[in-house]
């Protein structure tokens, strides 16, 4: 049954064909198998005598590739050069193997095809590995692209090798534009022209100046805009050296910080003005009382003198009128001082209650006293906007929250709970602490000026708070909880305000 | 229910928590020939209200006191149907509060400290007021409305600012003019409205229902 192999170097060929570890199949001109080497047997599970005489596409080729293989087979007969293609073989036990084929034709002296020699390489495992690798790469890529910071890799020459999606957003270059360009396009001066030197210095000396530590820098977008960023660089070496840069855009963060700082500043300012106003009002009241008494007494004396007939009284009455005049002058000075400091009218506009509360909480918790305090917030959704003077309301909230924080300095359990809700036409803001609560004596004078239980502090915070909440037609109250600690509630009307706003 | 013979110009029920003020004002009013009945709190006044002869009498009460405040006392009297003219005193010079008092029916307000003339003219006006409700205010209204009609739009704006308790400076800023211009407007308004005092001007504004609620 052996084919006629006279025209090739018989014995040697035979040896090679049977020794090689790759499938070698010789097909006749009609496609039926004439040789099926032992590697083919091992690969497919068919013995040579099971295979020989059958057409290869009748049993070895998976169904959907049969037509393709047939047409390749027909094409091969017309060509003189080797052809290459890949297909799947089906083994006897039903497995699929991916084989890369090199086909060549063996022609007789007349030039007609007598045989086709097909040598294959089983690439099933290799492809699987490659596929797995590609999958891993795609997976890594997806992680990198999902990364909220820009990820950029460069080579030893400083040329960009990869550019993540966030890098595209952040810097404004497309990945395709960025790859291959010097990374210094992302760096404003002075770093821009120094960067190549930095890399060279590192490669020569191994001295790490930035690798492995985070550093704030300025970076440059495609449109030339400079922005603050945090840069982390790590190094990866696998034959070639790659540097990976993680760039975090801090613009937004800075803005948030700046807004908080601004709010803090405004609150401090408003606090000082409020304090001065409260003091001025108190002084005006306290001083006006004795001045009223004095003016009235002088008036009484003057009236009584007028009832007498002594000539000397005329002068005395005039002098007493001067006394009253001076008293009024003193009172006028007090009034001017108070008017100058006090009447900062509330400036109301629409603000989201929860946002106002969140900001105030953030500001109030800045500082060492807040350490160890467990904050719990429960801000009900859908509260919407309320007409208010944001700074003044935040001043109240900061004041109440700070009081709560101060109250918990000595207690072991430090829980601060801040919540918002809607109760019968009012928005209620609650601030609860686990401090010692308020003494009965203190409770009576809680919102009066100069009432304080603290060693430092003037005791006008809550008095100002009440003034502010009154101006918002709201209510502020404090109660001691049975479980310990106290609750401050601030109620702001939901509707009443629109009317006031309209009038302005 | 008794009143001494020398009741003179009428009875004044003085309520003020400050003892010195009480003594001073009482001395002044006694010298001015009023009968004075003092209380150091709204509560004390209410407790003896029944025993007082309220004919030809006026309540002179401080707005700012511990416990029941002046405004609340006034509201309580209105609620209880006690017809007693009320004059509020304020040491704060808190115009919005005074405006609120007048809206609630107070006849007048006095800024502490006050002169003999200021307090006596306010008391006499209150005492001469026909008893029972707002009849006089209504009667005066057409005349008042006519006076108000002579104000320029700008003067009306300034008047609105004044009764809202704004300072000249604040009014100037909101109208974008100088404080001096506001002062000039203010004097013009006083003349046109024929108001002898700031309190009277505020009272007119209340009657005209210009004040915000």
Image (tube, helix red, strand yellow):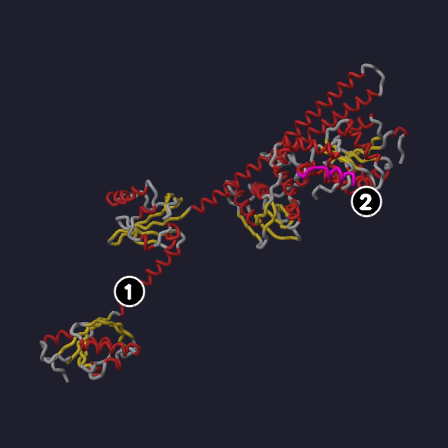
Between label 1 and label 2, give the one nearer the viewer: 2
Dot 1, crowdedness within 10 Å: few (<14), some or many (≥20)? few
For numbered disc 1, what is the local secondary structure?
Answer: helix
Query: Which chain's residue wears label 2?
Result: B
Q: Is residue A71 visible?
A: yes
Query: What is the quadrant of residue A331 in the picture?
Result: top right
Residue B19 at x, y percent in the picture: 76, 30
Residue B178 at x, y percent in the picture: 61, 32
Circles 1, 2 touching at the beta carbon (< 8 Å)? no
Q: Residue furthest top?
A: A312
Total label count? 2
Query: What is the quadrant of residue B92 in the picture?
Result: top right
Check disc 1 and report the residue beneath it: A130
Residue B109 at x, y percent in the picture: 75, 35
Query: Which chain's residue wears label 1?
Result: A
Main SS of the magenta part reads helix
Asked if both marks, 1 and 2, belong to the same chain, the answer given is no
Q: From the viewer's perspective, is A101 left or right of A168?
A: left
> Residue B80 shows which numbered tag?
2
Query: Magenta includes B18?
Result: no
Magenta range: B142-153
**Dividing the image into 4 quarters, which one contains the N terminus of chain A?**
bottom left
Query: Is B173 drawn above or below residue A307 in the view shown?
Result: below
Query: Magenta includes B152?
Result: yes
Q: From the viewer's perspective, is A41 left or right of A16?
A: right
Query: Is A270 drawn above or below residue A56 in the view shown?
Result: above
Q: Is residue A410 visible?
A: no
Query: Is A502 drawn above or below residue B96 in the view shown?
Result: below
The residue at the point 75 percent across, 18 percent down is: A319
> Residue B75 shows which numbered tag?
none
């Amino acid at each position: 049954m052996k084919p006629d192999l006279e025209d090739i170097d018989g014995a040697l060929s035979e040896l090679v064909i049977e020794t090689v570890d790759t499938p070698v199949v010789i097909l006749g001109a009609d496609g039926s198998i004439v040789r099926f080497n032992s590697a083919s047997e091992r690969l497919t599970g068919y013995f040579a005598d099971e295979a020989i005489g059958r057409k290869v596409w009748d049993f070895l080729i998976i169904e959907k590739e049969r037509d393709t293989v047939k047409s390749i087979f027909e094409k091969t007969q017309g060509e003189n050069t080797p052809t290459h293609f890949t297909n799947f073989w089906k083994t006897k036990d039903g497995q699929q193997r991916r084989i890369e084929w090199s086909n060549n034709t063996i022609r007789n002296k007349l030039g007609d095809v007598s045989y086709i020699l097909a040598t294959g390489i089983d690439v099933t495992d290799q492809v699987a590995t490659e596929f797995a690798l590609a999958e891993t790469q795609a997976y890594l890529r997806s992680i990198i692209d999902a990364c909220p910071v820009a990820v950029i890799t460069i080579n030893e020459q400083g040329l960009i090798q990869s550019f993540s999606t966030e890098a595209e957003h952040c810097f404004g270059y497309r990945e395709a534009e960025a790859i291959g360009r010097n990374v210094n396009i992302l760096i404003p001066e002075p770093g821009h022209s120094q960067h190549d030197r930095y890399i060279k210095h590192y490669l020569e000396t191994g001295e790490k100046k930035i690798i492995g530590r985070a550093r704030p820098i300025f970076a440059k977008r495609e449109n030339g805009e400079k922005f603050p960023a945090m840069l982390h660089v790590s190094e990866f070496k696998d034959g070639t050296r790659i540097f990976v840069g993680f760039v975090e855009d801090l613009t937004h963060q800075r803005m948030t910080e700046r807004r908080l700082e601004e709010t803090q500043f405004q609150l401090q300012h408003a606090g000082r003005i409020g304090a001065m106003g409260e003091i001025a009002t108190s002084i005006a009241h306290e001083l006006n009382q004795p001045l009223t008494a004095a003016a009235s007494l002088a008036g009484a004396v003057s009236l009584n003198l007028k009832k007498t007939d002594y000539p000397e009284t005329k002068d005395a009455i005039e002098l007493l009128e001067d006394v009253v005049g001076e008293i009024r002058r003193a009172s006028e000075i007090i009034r001017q001082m108070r008017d100058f400091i006090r009447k900062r009218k509330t400036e109301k506009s629409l603000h989201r209650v929860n946002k106002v509360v969140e900001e105030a909480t953030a500001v109030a918790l800045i500082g060492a006293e807040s350490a160890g305090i467990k904050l719990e917030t429960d801000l009900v959704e859908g509260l919407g906007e309320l007409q208010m003077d944001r700074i003044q309301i935040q001043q109240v909230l900061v004041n109440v929250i700070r009081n709560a924080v101060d109250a918990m300095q000595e207690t072991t359990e430090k829980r601060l709970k801040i919540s918002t809700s809607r109760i019968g036409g009012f928005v209620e803001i609650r601030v609860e602490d686990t401090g010692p609560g308020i003494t009965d004596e203190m409770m009576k004078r809680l919102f009066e000026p100069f009432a304080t239980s603290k060693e430092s502090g003037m005791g006008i915070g809550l008095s100002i708070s009440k003034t502010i909440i009154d101006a918002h037609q709201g209510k502020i109250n404090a109660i001691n909880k049975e479980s310990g600690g106290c609750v401050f509630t601030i109620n702001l009307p939901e509707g009443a305000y629109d009317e006031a706003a309209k009038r302005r | 229910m008794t009143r001494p013979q020398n009741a003179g110009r009428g009875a004044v029920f003085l309520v003020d928590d400050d003892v010195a003020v009480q003594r001073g004002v009482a001395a002044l009013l006694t010298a001015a020939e009023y009968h004075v009945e003092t209380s150091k709190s709204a509560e004390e006044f209410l407790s003896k209200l029944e025993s007082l002869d309220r004919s030809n009498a006026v309540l002179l009460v401080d707005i700012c006191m511990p416990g029941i405040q002046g405004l609340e006392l006034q509201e309580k009297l209105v609620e209880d149907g006690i017809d007693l003219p009320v004059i509020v005193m304020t040491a704060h010079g808190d115009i919005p509060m005074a405006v609120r008092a007048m809206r609630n029916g107070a006849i007048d307000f006095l800024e502490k400290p006050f002169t003999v003339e200021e307090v006596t003219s306010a008391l006499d006006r209150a005492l001469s007021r026909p008893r029972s409700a707002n009849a006089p205010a209504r009667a005066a209204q057409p005349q008042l409305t006519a006076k108000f009609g002579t104000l320029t739009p700008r003067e009306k704006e300034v008047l609105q600012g004044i009764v809202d308790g704004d300072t000249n400076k604040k009014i100037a800023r909101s109208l974008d003019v100088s404080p001096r211009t506001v002062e000039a407007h203010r004097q013009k308004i006083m003349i046109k409205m024929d108001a002898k005092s700031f309190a009277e001007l505020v009272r007119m504004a209340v009657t005209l229902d210009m004040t915000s609620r």
